Amino acid sequence: MNKGDPVDVSPRAREIARQFKAMGKPEAFDLAQERQNTKDAHVLTGAPRDVLMEWEDVAGQRCIRMRPANATGTREVIFLHGGAYCLMSALTHHRFAGHIANAVQADVLLPDYPLAPETPYPGARDMCMEVQKDRRTHGPEHQIVAGDSAGAGLALSLTCALRDDGAALPDALILMSPWLDLSLSGKALQAGDIEDPILALGNLSAMADLYRGAMPATDPGVSPLFSDHTGLPPTLIQSAENDLLREDAERLAAGWPDADTVELQEYRGMLHSFQMFAGDMPEADGAIRACAPFLDRVL
């Protein structure tokens, strides 16, 4: 990203960034407070139109299904919510998923996976794998696994595990503002060169430790940036300029073994997981709409 170029950011996006800056960041990590602060995060997303929300059990796991009126019936998305592995839920992201459902004309299934530290790695990943395997067998022709932030990390980690096990893979991946490196080793991140009004390095480090348990922070299971990415399905990666974790997206795309099967979309002036502001921010709506032509091309 060339910071010398002017950035055309909508007034609403500027206002949202201003509000986060005004809120400030906590001086110390407090898991209970962070959970309280984020439990109603669905209100950040505008309500999607013509989408039915249903709870259902898949492979013995509780999930939310967002069913759009325009679904073609030929594809299904499994969406793994963000929240640094310790926060949020399927419910906080159901509106977000509803906008994706409308954009790609497909049902979106959100596993309500268990959080750390109550359930450290690999609990959430393994639960999501069971849902993926069930829907790969019983679902429509095409399966997409997607996620934002930590959910994108789960999406990539479980797909690598499926590949290693010789199991059926999803047909495509969509990774939005992915958190892929729990060791937080990005050069710009460590140098303090990224202005992010939402994420705090200390909080990320604390939640990474809670999630990984006894695993090293560079273990490929918890930090799939360090996995072998050979043989994975076509992958769309979306990154945001003002995101402490943007280098995870950039490094993944740069190291992808087959340039024809990866697409990196970089969004200037945007915040971490800005797509969650769909229905309230034009850039979020545009990023979600961009998923549709990608899927049309690769499926």
Image (spheres, rainbow, N blue to C red):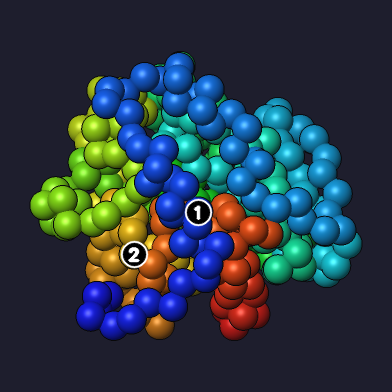
- Asked whether the beta carbons under mark 1 and mark 2 sit within 8 Å of each other, the answer is no
In the image: residue 64, left or right of residue 149: right
Q: Secondary structure at mark 1?
A: helix
The quadrant in which residue 53 appears is top right
The residue lying toward the viewer, choosing from 30 and 158, is 30
Q: Dot 1, crowdedness within 10 Å: few (<14), some or many (≥20)?
A: some
Relative horizontal placement of residue 21, taking residue 220 as reference (left or right): right
Q: Can the viewer see residue 172?
A: no
Dot 2, how many residues are within 10 Å of its Cα: few (below 14), some (14-19), or many (20+)? many
Whichever of labels 1 and 2 marks the residue nearer the N terminus, that label is: 1
How far separated are the C-alphas under marks 1 and 2?
A: 15 Å
- Answer with left or right where residue 260 lies relative to residue 275: left
Residue drawn where x is 41% and y is 38% of the image: 23
Does residue 134 appear left or right of residue 160 in this picture?
right
Q: Quadrant of the N terminus?
A: bottom left
Place of residue 260 in the rendered image (x, y in percent of width and height, measured from the top left) = 40, 82
Which residue is painted at 44% across and 33% down in the image?
85
Q: Secondary structure at mark 2?
A: strand
Q: Label 1, on which residue?
A: 16
Residue 127, position as x, y percentages in the image: 56, 33
Q: Height in image: 45 above or below 10?
A: above
Residue 71 seen in this snapshot: yes
| Location of residue 178 in the rendering, given as x and y in whole percent from the top left corner | 40, 54
Of the 4 image quadrants, the one containing the C terminus is bottom right
Residue at 70% of width from left, 53% of height from top? Answer: 46
Q: How many marks?
A: 2
- Residue name at image x 57 percent, y 53 percent: 276
The residue beneath circle 2 is: 241
**Comparing marks 1 and 2, which lies closer to the viewer?**
1
The residue type indicated by label 2 comes to: Glu
